[in-house]
Image (cartoon, rainbow, N blue to C red):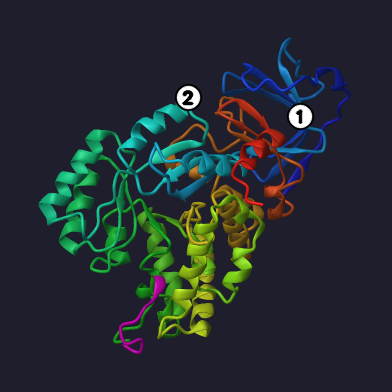
Amino acid sequence: MRIIKHRWALVIVALLGAEASLAEMTAFVNVNVVPMSSNTVIAAQTVLVEDGIISAIGSVDEIRIPKGARAVDGTDRYLMPGLAEMHAHVPAADSRNLDRDFSLFVANGITTIRGMLGKPSHLALRQRLLDGELFGPRLITSGPSLNGRTVQGAPDARRQVREQAAAGYDFIKVHPGLSAAEFTALAETANELGIPFAGHVPVAVGVRAALELNIATIDHLDGYLVSLLPAHSYESGGYGGFFDIMLAAELDPQQISEIAAATAASGTWNVPTQVLIEHRVSATPASELQNRAEMKYMPAETVERWFATKQALLSERDFDPEVAELAIVLRRQLILALHEAGARLLLGSDAPQVFNVPGYSTHRELQVLVASGLTTFEALQTGTTAAAEFLGTNAGSLQVGKDADLVLLDANPLEDIENSRRIHGVMLRGRWLSGQALQERLEKYRRD
């Protein structure tokens, strides 16, 4: 990481006024810019935002603050693009949980989410969020999932893909249970219509066939462990467990590089959601996860249900904690191998899910990506520039002309991934929200 410094001599105190959340122009004054388009920090900058777009970036000695603009003091702080959570679950538009989940995402610097289990109500919700009528991150949404219970044969798969594409969903969600013929029909129709399909890899299909059929993202690394089984491996007796983790002792790690290269060649992206797997099957006691600070924002009955889910999985007859720990190690190796092979990764944690509190779990996923071998810059790319490239949005980097979905941090995230949690405030579609304002939103959901 390079740090680019500029001298500055600007008195900013007079510019700092009361927060005006709907002001048309905002100036971040004397801030360190983390553009994410390169592994650099550009010191002593002024960043102007007008009508939701970054309009100017330059030295504090060169950029004039327009009259009437709200000034945000960036001294000793770091401004970076907002993060994308690429595997989220969104309640129905009329759910009482909607504002809580959206507030948790935004308070954690998540300015875009990809909803992986869409509902018809999400189409209007997506537009209301974009128009600023409703508080929350930008929403990319699938339709209702296509799975073994909802699809009745290949013709039905084609029909449902056509209907969802015509309805305006952003992509097709694949869940388990589809036959090979149904999945192929889904894929061919989606490819013909130009709508992505993403999610799980049906057992009847397998990773290599899914790659050949142009699946847009594989989530949870679903199907990858099975692809590493040597020929004629039957030691598991058919029990794979949660995402096949109980197969870990039978896998051939030498095959990781080959499947990583095949993934890179196919152009398919991966959303590992590694923290989801580790929360469920690691040796970390459920009681410890239950007592994490962020759990206070979730209903007590939800946290209790999560506790019971983990306990039930660990109590399954054929569950082996040593094999589970080996699976965690192999999955982390696979994440790094995919990255090093050039297979693209996207940031996603699957929230809300078992011990995955919206927003907080995204930062825990960043920690896991770094623990897997990515640098802090590479990990942050999965939720910024990479997410914007995959989605085709005008966000993800801090440059003139980009959408102003931004996060102001109290420390440099490129030095320590933990610093991405140190949020001073968030700009959401050009609207500035101080840390205090965000905390006030969360207080109504806090349990004492």
Residue assigned mark 1: 45
- Residue 439 position by quadrant: top right
Q: SS of the residue at dot 2?
A: loop
Residue 323 appears anywhere in the view: yes
Amino acid, disc 2: Glu
Q: Is residue 272 above or below residue 224?
A: above
Query: What residue is drawn where x is 50% and y is 58%?
Result: 301
Q: Residue 194 placed where, x, y %?
A: 27, 40
Q: Tell me if label 2 and label 1 are in contact, CB under 8 Å.
A: no
Find residue 245 and report its image quarter.
bottom left
> Residue 297 at x, y = what percent?
59, 50
In magenta stretch: residue 240: yes
Q: Is residue 206 magenta?
A: no
Give whichever of discs 2 and 1 has the lower sequence position: 1
Label 2 environment density (alpha carbons within 10 Å; few <14, some 14–19, many ≥20): few
Mark 1 element type: strand
Residue 378 in sight: no
What's drawn in magenta, residue-wise? Answer: 234-242
Give above or below for 50 relative to 146: above
Whole-percent x and y of residue 303? 53, 60
Q: Position of residue 112 (x, y in %)?
A: 50, 39
Mark 1: amino acid:
Gln
